[in-house]
Image: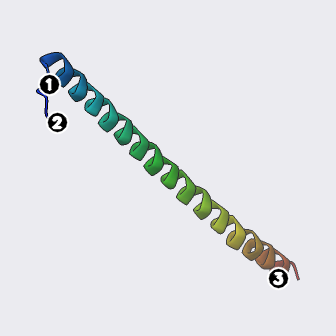
Amino acid sequence: MGQKMTAKQRAAQVEAARKREEAERKRRERAARTKKIFTVVVCVILVLALGIPTVAIMAMGGAS
């Protein structure tokens, strides 16, 4: 930049940078929350996939 920035331009640039940082922070928070939800859903599916057949086998084995 060859020219000096006025106070108004500098304030606008600082405000734009602050908005970009805030948007990036919100995006990261959303990504982290989505990752946590995905992990919980996968764990629940695995527990059900492993637990239901085990209970069914035990019930059939115990009935005989």
Question: Of the residues tagged 1 and 2, which is closer to the observer?
Answer: 2
Picture residue at 74% right of the left edge, 68% below the top: 52
Q: Earlier in the sequence, mark 2 or mark 3?
A: 2
Give percent across and percent down for residue 16.
Answer: 29, 28
Residue 44 location, x and y as percent? Answer: 62, 60
Residue found at the very far right of the displayed protein? 64
The image quarter containing residue 2 is top left
Q: Quadrant of the N terminus?
A: top left
Contact (Cβ within 8 Å) of mark 1 with mark 2? yes
- Label 2 belongs to which residue? 1
The residue beneath circle 1 is 5
Q: Position of residue 46 (x, y in %)?
A: 64, 68
Measure the alpha-carbon separation of dots 1 and 2.
9 Å
Q: Are marks 3 and 1 in contact (CB under 8 Å)?
A: no
Q: Nearer the viewer, mark 3 or mark 1?
A: 1
Identify the amino acid type marked 3.
Gly
Residue type beneath disc 1: Met
Label 3 packing within 10 angstroms: few (<14), some (14-19), many (20+): few
> Residue 34: x percent and y percent?
52, 49
